[in-house]
Amino acid sequence: MALITAIYGSPRRQGNTSRLLQQAVAGARDQGAAVTEIVLRDIKIAPCMEIYGCTEAGECVIQDGFQPIRDSILASDGIMLASPIFFYTVSAHTKIFMDRCQSLWVKKYWIDDLQKEQWVSKRQGLFISAGATHGKKLFDGALLTVRYFFDVIDTALWRSLLYRGLDFEEDVLEHPDYLEASYTAGQTLATLLNRTT
Ligand SMILES: Cc1cc2nc3c(=O)[nH]c(=O)nc-3n(C[C@H](O)[C@H](O)[C@H](O)COP(=O)(O)O)c2cc1C
């Protein structure tokens, strides 16, 4: 059975990216995956303090809501991450969590001294995002950040679902095709992971 961690990065509980991710979670569960849902807005996570306490053992020395999420990710075969576009990148909730994963970067590249050519992906990742505007580069910043973050958590960016022109909380409900695509992506990811786990 595939294990998936689904991370909701929007401050809105029922906003566009949350609704899309809920569909992906439903699709994955319908294919038999066990999905742990993490709603970042509900969890107290301090920003990285850049004190590098993690250089001792690769463990972040700030003990808070970060550790259980990290443990869920490390135990998973798949990651689903949803974040709205805020100022051309991911939301602050999402970015604060990503920054705390610097402890994993330190473990991998400084403590274990992994060489880039030794890197292998252990998990597959789905990224879901939405922004209000329509520009060609709307998702460029977030994609760069997500790819680099996924690298740190040994995850290949398997698929991105990126939707323009969504602004108000329920806008995505006017696009059943987007919701359906999310559901299908969740199903497909779970099927893929079921085959390989
Ligand atoms: C702080 C903030 C910054 C935003 N920055 C952008 C932006 O740079 N580009 C854009 O197209 N939309 C921007 N938006 C709009 C959101 O991306 C849009 O409303 C999105 O659908 C919200 O997704 P959610 O409902 O999942 O939170 C911003 C909204 C907020 C609140």
Image: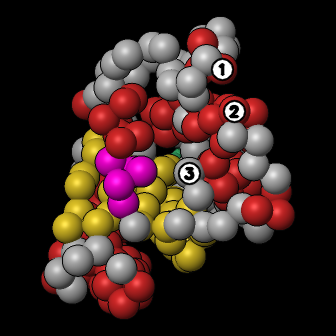
Q: Which mark is residue 111?
A: 2
- Give the spatial CA distance, label 1 vs label 2: 7 Å
In percent of width and height, residue 176 lies at: 31, 82
Q: Are marks 1 and 3 in contact (CB under 8 Å)?
A: no
| 113 vs 62: above or below | below
Kindly report which numbered mark, 2 or 3, lies closer to the viewer in this rendering.
2
10 Å neighbourhood of mark 2: few (<14), some, or many (≥20)? some
SS label for mark 3: loop
In percent of width and height, residue 156 lies at: 60, 68
SS label for mark 1: helix
Residue that label 3 marks: 153
SS label for mark 2: helix
Which amino acid type is marked by label 1? Thr
Observer able to see residue 182? yes
Q: Are marks 1 and 2 in contact (CB under 8 Å)?
A: yes
Disc 1 under 8 Å from ligand 1? The reply is no
Residue that label 1 marks: 55
Quadrant containing the N terminus is bottom left
| 9 vs 136: above or below | above
Q: Does residue 172 appear to the left or right of 1 in the view shown? A: right
- Figure quadrant of residue 36: bottom left
Could you tell me which residue is drawn at 49 percent across and 34 percent down? 97
Magenta stretch: give its range: 72-76
Could you tell me which residue is drawn at 82 percent across and 57 percent down? 116
10 Å neighbourhood of mark 3: few (<14), some, or many (≥20)? many
In percent of width and height, residue 186 lies at: 34, 78
10 Å neighbourhood of mark 1: few (<14), some, or many (≥20)? some
Of mark 1 and mark 3, the one earlier in the sequence is: 1
Tell me which secondary structure the magenta stretch mostly adopts: helix
Quadrant containing the C terminus is bottom left
Could you tell me which residue is drawn at 56 percent across and 76 percent down? 158
